Amino acid sequence: MTPVRSLSRLVVPAAVFLVVSCSGSPEPQHVPATQSTTPTRSTVPAVATVDADGALLEGIRLGEFVVLPGDVDPTLTHLPWDTTAIGPLPKHAPGGPDFDAAFPGVATQHNMLAGFKTYGGAPQGVARLSLRIVVMRFLDAETAVRAADELAEVATTTTGISDDDVYQAAPLADEPEVRYSITKREKSVGVRAFAPYHEYVIYTGVDAVTEVDAERTTKRAIELQRPLLDSFVATEPAKYAELPIDPEGVYGLALGTGYRRAREGTYGPRAASLMMYDQPRMLALFGDVGMTAAGVAGTTVYRTRDNAAAQQLAMVLSEFVVRHHNYDAQLLAPAATPPDSPNTQCWSTLAGIRSWYCLVTEGRYVGEIWEGSKTEAHDLAIQQARALLTAR
């Protein structure tokens, strides 16, 4: 039986879930190993504070049915520094940074039920391209259409990345239902598109070098997203409050609290991969190692098939992070590990709030830690190893 995490804060990265800085001293509390009750919202007081109606938990479920930016374009292997661009949608801020600033309150006014957002960007040295995807669920198709119309209208009356961005409505070839707008810059273009689909609105925000690239990326993202939503079995809103916070027993193993409490919870493999570098490769790896659930708080805990699978996952995680993560052009390099911790590896850069990265492997579990100092990273790694030793 896995220990249950007692939330005094709550319900994503870590993992490159990512680039989260965890501050404070985590104080995990555990129930006796003989207890078999999975914690639910009713037994975790903080859930009522952070996720009063269960919409965030439903958003995490929806994340299993969101398209991978890396499937839209294989160059989209990188993540944003602002980790609030990825995860379930809080109703008061239903997008990423640019989406929040441009469309305050629109989704809330139309009673958005749940949603999920993700992002992918091309690395330095590759032609500029980035893709933000936001999926929002509303009460019915009619409401989704009204929300898409209003969002599209707001898109043409607000600026984007800079105050010089002015978006103008334009048709999107072969997609008459998509509300499409574009801004042209000196060396790039930006696109905002809203596609109503049944009771959903699919938002795609694209930055590209050419209009052709922007249009191709937008159409491909929407094309891939629609069938995924057809497979999603949504929870009735009246039953959101019954959704369990830790259905797989892995969230209770994660320590501390994340950068945004609303991102904490239990994630399936696709939703977990949406918050990681090189998403398609990571999702394939999750399948190879039998990773079916990840618990995300201040640390992230991945449960795999067995010890060998956990070792494989840790090896590839470190490879991806070392290859892609940098701070002021400083890449992660092997660094000191905590004393007497043979199952822990660490890497670091010279500075930054995410300057220390550690992986802890115990049995079939991998614990992932991002911290801003050696002391913080080592202390949390030691605590994480102890928590994983009690897990099955």
Image: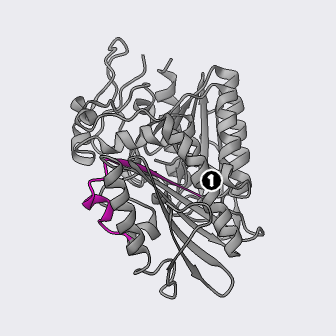
Taking the spot 57% from the left edge, 46% from the top edge, the residue there is 15
Residue name at image x 65 percent, y 61 percent? 217
Q: Nearer the viewer, residue 385 or 93?
A: 93
Point out residue 236 in the picture as x, y percentages from the top left corner: 29, 34
Relative vertical location of residue 279 with respect to residue 183 in this rendering, above or below = above
The answer to whether 250 appears left or right of 80 in the picture is: left
Residue 67 visible in the shown view: no
Residue positioned 25% across, 32% down in the render: 239
- 352 left or right of 55 in image: right
Pointer 1 residue = 69
Closest to the observer, 83 or 222: 222
Tell me what residue is drawn at x 32 percent, y 14 percent: 35
Secondary element at image label 1: helix
- Which contiguous range is marked in magenta? 103-119
Name the spot of residue 318 as percent of width and height, x first.
Answer: 69, 44
Q: Label 1 amino acid?
A: Pro
